[in-house]
Image (tube, grey):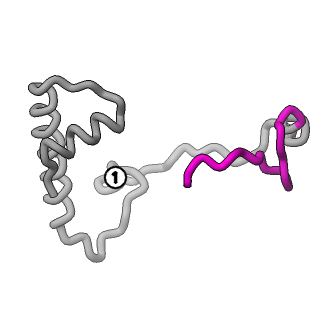
Amino acid sequence: MSLTPQDISRIASLARLELQPHESDRMLAQINDFFSIVEAMRSVDTTGVEPLAHPVAAIQEVALRLRDDIASEPNQREANQRSAPAVERGLFLVPKVIE
């Protein structure tokens, strides 16, 4: 996959960026280089390879320092939702923004 200058212009427009022509050319080259790296990574056969929790785990045993998942604050949902204009079954109701 590679992008065209028109793609870069459209992305810049969506991001509300104003790119100069030399910036647009540089951005096109950088993004296409990134896609080349992704394609090279996709071509590697990873069948049977287990995912790692940490990259160092491939060469040595790693003990992750995870804390216990304990609630440290009381549930204040009702108090926090009192100022909301609309709440239903514990959820904030908001206007539809995507059509």
Q: Residue at x 16, y 59 (%)?
A: 39
Residue 33, compared with residue 45, is above or below; it is above
Query: Residue 14 appears at what percent x and percent y?
Result: 35, 38
x and y percentages locating residue 18 in the rendered image: 26, 25
State left or right for residue 18 relative to residue 92.
left
Amino acid beneath label 1? Gln
**Magenta stretch, main secondary structure class:** loop
Tell me the crowding category of disc 1: few under 14, some 14 to 19, or many 20 or more residues within 10 angstroms, Cα based. few
Residue placed at 50% from the left, 48% from the top?
64
Position of residue 69 measured from the top left corner of the image (x, y, whole percent): 70, 48
| Magenta stretch holds residue 35 | no
| In-image side of 70 versus 15 (left or right) | right
Which quarter of the figure has residue 29?
Answer: top left
Is residue 94 one of those drawn in magenta? yes
Residue that appears at 16% across and 23% down: 20
Quarter of the picture holding the C terminus: bottom right
The residue indicated by pointer 1 is 60
**Of 82 and 39, the residue lying toward us:** 82
- What is the span of residues highlighted in magenta in the rendered image? 82-99
Height in image: 99 above or below 84? below
Dot 1: element? loop
Residue found at the far bottom of this picture: 48
